[in-house]
Image (cartoon, helix red, strand yellow):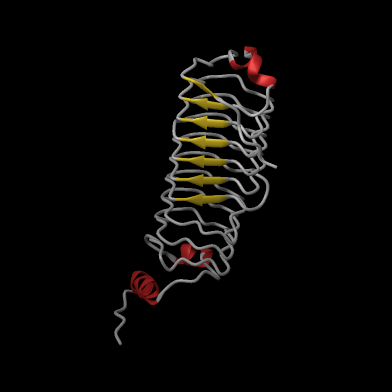
């Protein structure tokens, strides 16, 4: 169960180990507003239900922290380490998490909406129901992630690696897949009709086996592969 956070702490410098020294740490879920947690050591802390609003978490170390039901709104977490975290039910909205590391974290029902996730690493994450919408995932590592049966709309997946990712039954409307690596990705019933597929060669076409595309996309692929003209 997610708990409503207490009165906020605002505009504080909580970098390094300063947050560990706060008396409020054991008072239950806290709301931090515009706090500087850059390079903070938050490893292993119980931060269940905490809210971070417009905070700076750049290069913070949150490895092993319990962040389930946490709320991250605005601010940044560039190159932050969320390794081995519990992020079940967490929500990231309009956060710049470029280069963040989420490996081996529990992501059940976690949501990322409107975030910058360029170069972020999700390989090895666990759990079902992770949602990504309107995010920039340029060159992100999503190898093996469970993203099936979800509305994965408005994603920039240019140069992203989706090797072995489970996208079965998902809707990728408005996504850009230019040069995305789809090797061994599971795409059965994945709706690609509203996606920008980029150039499609035979290897890429094979990787798209089972996906749903529209007539215009099919014609473009046929032209690219066989240099034929399709007419009615």
Q: Nearer the viewer, residue 211 or 63?
A: 63
Location of the C terminus by quadrant is bottom left
* Direction from residue 145 to residue 79 in the image, left or right: left
Location of the N terminus by quadrant is top right
* Residue 170 in picture, x, y percent from top left: 54, 62
Q: Nearer the viewer, residue 215 or 199?
A: 215
Identify the residue shown where x is 35% and y is 69%. Answer: 224
Above or below: residue 99 compared with residue 190: above
Above or below: residue 144 compared with residue 226: above
* Residue 188 in picture, x, y percent from top left: 58, 68
Q: How many marks?
A: 0
- The residue most toward the front is 7
* Residue 213 in picture, x, y percent from top left: 45, 71
* Direction from residue 131 to residue 124 in the image, left or right: right
Identify the residue shown where x is 40% and y is 74%. Answer: 218
* Residue 160 in picture, x, y percent from top left: 47, 48
């Amino acid at each position: 169960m997610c708990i409503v956070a207490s009165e906020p702490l605002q505009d504080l410098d909580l970098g390094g180990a300063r947050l560990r020294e706060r008396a409020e740490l054991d008072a239950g879920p806290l709301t931090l507003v515009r706090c500087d947690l850059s390079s903070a050591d938050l490893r292993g802390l119980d931060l269940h239900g905490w809210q971070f609003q417009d905070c700076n978490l750049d290069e913070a170390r949150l490895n092993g922290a319990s962040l389930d039901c946490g709320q991250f709104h605005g601010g940044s977490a560039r190159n932050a380490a969320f390794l081995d975290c519990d992020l079940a039910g967490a929500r990231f909205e309009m956060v710049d998490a470029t280069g963040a590391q989420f490996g081996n974290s529990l992501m059940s029902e976690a949501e990322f909406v409107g975030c910058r996730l360029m170069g972020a690493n999700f390989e090895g994450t666990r759990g079902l129901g992770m949602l990504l919408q309107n995010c920039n995932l340029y060159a992100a590592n999503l190898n093996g992630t469970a993203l099936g049966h979800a509305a994965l709309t408005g994603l920039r997946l240019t140069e992203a690696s989706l090797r072995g990712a489970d996208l079965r039954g998902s809707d990728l409307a408005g996504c850009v897949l230019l040069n995305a690596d789809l090797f061994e990705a599971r795409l059965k019933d994945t709706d690609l009709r509203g996606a920008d597929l980029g150039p499609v060669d035979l290897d890429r076409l094979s990787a798209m086996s089972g996906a749903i595309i529209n007539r215009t996309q099919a014609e473009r692929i046929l032209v690219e592969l066989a240099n034929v003209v399709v007419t009615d």
